[in-house]
C-alpha cells in the first residue's frame, strides 16, 4: 500500500504543478477554448490543454520505477508488453489529442490513429477473448476477439471524449471508473493494476482542482482521449483476469455513464439523419440542465451519483453469482429506463415527426456540404458571398446578409453583401445572427431573416449556420493571407 500511496501522491503533485503551468502559459499565449458556438456551455474563453497535466501526472510515478529499485518496480519492468502498450499507445493518443486541441483534427485522422493504437494493443496481448454470460456458459469469441477488442478501445476513447461537456464531468466519471478497477485489482492482489490506477487517480484529482465548476482550465481532447485509452486498456486486463461469470460486464458497468451516453447519441443521430460525429446539446448532461432545470454544478454532482451507482453495481457483479448478477442487472436496467423517461429519450409523442425530421436533416446536410465546399474553393470575398447565397433559399429565409472584414481591418472597414427573397413571406421577421470568428477575433456576421411566421429556427438549422460561418471565417483568413503574399491576385472590394 505504501507504493500505491507514493504513486498517488507523486502523480497528484505533478498534475497540480503541470496543470497550473499549462494554464498560465495557455492564457499568455492565447491557447483558449473559444465561445463562438452555441454548443459551448461556458461563457468566456478558457484554456483547454489541461490534459497535459493528466498525462504528465500519470507517467511521472511510472517513470520513477525505472530509477528506484523496488519489488513493485521489478514486477512492472518485467511486464514489457504492458509498458510498451501504455507508454507508446498513451503517448500516441495524447499527441493526437494535443494536435486536435491546437490545430484541429478531422474524424478520419482521429480514427486512423485510434484504430492503429487499438490494433497494436491487440498484438501486445490486450485481448477480449471470452464473452461472459450471467445466465449460462461463457462464449469463446475466437476470430471475433480482434474486432471486439478494437471496437472496445476506440469506443471507450471516444465515449470519454463525448462526455467531456461540463466542468469536472469527464474527470469525475473517469475517477469513478479508476476507483472500480483499483478495488477489483486490490481484491485479486494484482499490484501492477493497483499501481496504474493509483497513478491515474492522483493525476485526475490534481487536474480536477482546477477543473471543477467554475473551471479555470479544460482537459481538452488531450486529456479525455488519454483517459479513455488508459481505462480501455486496463478494462481489458481486468476482464481477462476476472473469475466471475460476468467478466466483461464489470468494466462495461464501471464506465456505464459514458457508454450509455455514446449509445444514445449514436441512436439519436441515426434516427434523425444527423452526421454521426456532429456535436449537439442533447447529451445526458445537457438534458439534465434543460429538462430538470439543474445548475451546472448540480448536474455534475447528480451524474457523480449515477457513476457511484454504476460503480457499486460493477463491484457487486464481480462478487455475485449468476442469479444475483441477473437481479443486479435488472435493477440497473430499471434505473436506466426511469432516467431515460425523465430526460425525454423514451417520449413517443413525437415519434411521428422523426421521419420528417430525418428527411429535412438529410436535405440540410446536402445543402451545407455544397455551401461549405464552394466557400473553401472561393477565390475572393465576392465568391464567398456567391457560395453562401443558396442558404437563403435552402432554409426558406426572406433576407440574407454577410458582413465581412479581413483580420487586419478595423470594424468600420470591410464589405457587406445583401440579398432579399420577397416571396418568402410577409409576417413579422425572425432574425438570426451568427458570428464569423477566427478564434476570438470577430471577422463579421452571417445574418438571416424569416418572414414565414416561425418563432424560432430549430437546432439543426442553427448548427448548420455555425458550420457555414466557420468555413467562411477559415476562407476569409486564407484569402487575407493570399492577398498579403500576392496583392495582385485578390481584388479588394468595398461596399
Image (spheres, rainbow, N blue to C red):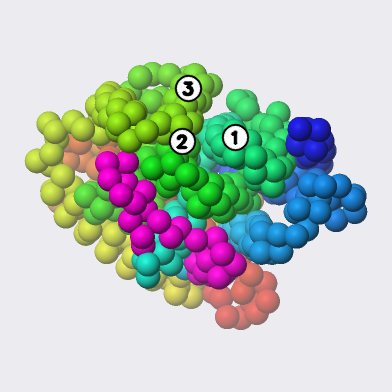
Q: Nearer the viewer, mark 1 or mark 3?
A: 1
Is residue 375 found left or right of 355 in the rendered image?
right
Residue 177: percent from left, percent from top:
54, 37
Task: Work out whether residue 197 or residue 203 is closer to the camera in this orientation and state it.
Answer: 197
In terms of image quadrants, where is residue 373? bottom left
- Disc 2 and disc 3: Cα gap in Å? 20 Å
Task: Work out whether residue 363 or residue 249 is closer to the camera in this orientation and state it.
Answer: 249
Residue 229: percent from left, percent from top:
57, 53
**Residue in the picture at 78% in, 58% down:** 77
Give the residue at mark 3.
Answer: 305
Quarter the N terminus occupies: top right
Q: Decide which of tag 1 and tag 3 comes sooner along the chain.
A: 1
- Disc 1 and disc 3: Cα gap in Å? 24 Å
Q: Is residue 358 magenta?
A: no
- Name the element at disc 3: helix
Give the residue at mark 1.
Answer: 187
Crowd rating for badge 2 (residues with CA inside 10 Å; few <14, some 14–19, many 20+)? many
Q: Nearer the viewer, mark 2 or mark 3?
A: 2
Q: Decide which of tag 2 and tag 1 comes sooner along the chain.
A: 1
**Residue in the picture at 22% in, 58% down:** 362
Residue 194: percent from left, percent from top:
67, 40
List the single residue furthest toward the left. Answer: 352
Q: Is residue 344 visible?
A: yes
**Residue in the picture at 80% in, 38% down:** 3
Task: Work out whether residue 356 or residue 316 is closer to the camera in this orientation and state it.
Answer: 316
- Range of magenta residues: 112-141
Give the residue at mark 2.
Answer: 318
- Name the element at disc 1: helix
- Name the element at disc 2: helix
Amino acid at each position: 500500500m505504501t507504493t500505491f500511496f507514493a504513486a498517488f501522491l507523486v502523480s497528484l503533485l505533478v498534475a497540480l504543478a503541470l496543470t497550473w503551468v499549462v494554464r498560465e502559459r495557455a492564457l499568455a499565449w492565447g491557447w483558449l477554448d473559444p465561445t463562438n458556438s452555441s454548443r459551448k456551455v461556458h461563457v468566456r474563453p478558457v484554456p483547454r490543454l489541461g490534459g497535459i497535466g493528466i498525462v504528465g501526472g500519470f507517467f511521472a510515478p511510472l517513470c520513477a520505477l525505472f530509477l528506484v529499485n523496488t519489488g513493485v518496480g521489478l514486477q512492472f519492468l518485467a511486464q514489457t508488453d504492458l509498458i510498451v502498450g501504455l507508454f507508446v499507445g498513451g503517448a500516441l493518443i495524447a499527441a493526437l489529442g494535443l494536435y486536435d486541441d491546437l490545430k484541429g483534427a478531422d474524424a478520419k485522422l482521429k480514427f486512423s490513429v485510434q484504430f492503429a493504437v487499438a490494433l497494436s494493443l491487440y498484438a501486445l496481448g490486450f485481448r477480449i477473448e471470452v464473452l461472459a454470460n450471467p445466465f449460462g456458459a461463457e462464449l469463446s469469441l475466437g476470430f471475433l476477439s480482434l474486432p471486439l477488442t478494437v471496437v472496445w478501445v476506440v469506443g471507450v476513447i471516444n465515449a470519454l471524449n463525448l462526455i467531456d461537456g461540463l466542468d469536472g464531468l469527464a474527470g469525475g466519471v473517469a475517477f469513478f471508473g479508476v476507483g472500480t478497477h483499483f478495488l477489483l485489482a486490490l481484491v485479486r492482489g494484482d499490484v501492477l493494476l493497483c499501481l496504474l490506477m493509483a497513478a491515474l487517480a492522483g493525476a485526475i484529482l490534481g487536474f480536477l482542482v482546477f477543473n471543477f465548476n467554475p473551471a479555470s482550465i479544460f482537459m481538452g481532447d488531450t486529456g479525455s482521449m488519454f483517459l479513455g485509452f488508459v481505462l480501455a486498456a486496463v478494462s481489458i486486463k481486468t476482464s481477462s483476469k476476472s473469475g466471475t461469470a460476468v467478466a466483461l460486464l464489470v468494466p462495461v458497468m464501471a464506465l456505464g455513464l459514458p457508454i450509455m451516453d455514446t449509445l444514445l447519441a449514436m441512436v439519436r443521430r441515426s434516427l434523425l439523419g444527423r452526421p454521426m460525429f456532429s456535436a449537439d446539446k442533447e447529451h445526458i448532461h445537457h438534458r439534465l440542465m434543460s429538462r430538470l432545470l439543474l445548475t451546472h454544478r448540480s448536474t455534475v454532482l447528480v451524474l457523480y451519483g449515477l457513476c457511484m451507482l454504476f460503480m457499486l453495481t460493477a463491484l457487486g457483479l464481480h462478487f455475485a453469482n449468476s442469479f444475483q448478477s441477473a437481479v443486479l442487472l435488472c435493477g440497473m436496467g430499471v434505473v436506466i429506463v426511469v432516467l431515460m423517461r425523465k430526460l425525454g429519450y423514451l417520449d413517443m409523442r413525437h415519434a411521428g415527426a422523426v421521419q420528417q425530421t430525418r428527411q429535412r436533416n438529410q436535405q440540410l446536410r446536402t445543402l451545407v456540404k455544397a455551401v461549405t465546399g464552394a466557400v473553401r474553393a472561393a477565390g475572393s470575398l465576392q465568391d464567398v458571398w456567391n457560395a453562401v447565397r443558396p442558404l437563403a433559399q435552402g432554409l426558406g429565409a426572406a433576407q440574407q446578409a454577410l458582413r465581412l472584414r479581413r483580420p487586419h481591418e478595423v470594424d468600420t472597414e470591410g464589405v457587406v453583401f445583401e440579398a432579399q427573397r420577397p416571396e418568402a413571406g410577409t409576417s413579422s421577421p425572425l432574425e438570426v445572427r451568427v458570428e464569423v470568428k477566427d478564434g476570438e477575433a470577430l471577422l463579421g456576421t452571417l445574418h438571416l431573416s424569416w418572414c414565414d411566421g416561425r418563432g424560432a429556427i430549430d437546432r439543426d438549422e442553427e448548427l448548420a449556420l455555425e458550420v457555414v460561418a466557420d468555413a467562411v471565417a477559415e476562407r476569409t483568413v486564407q484569402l487575407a493571407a493570399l492577398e498579403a503574399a500576392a496583392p495582385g491576385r485578390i481584388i479588394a472590394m468595398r461596399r
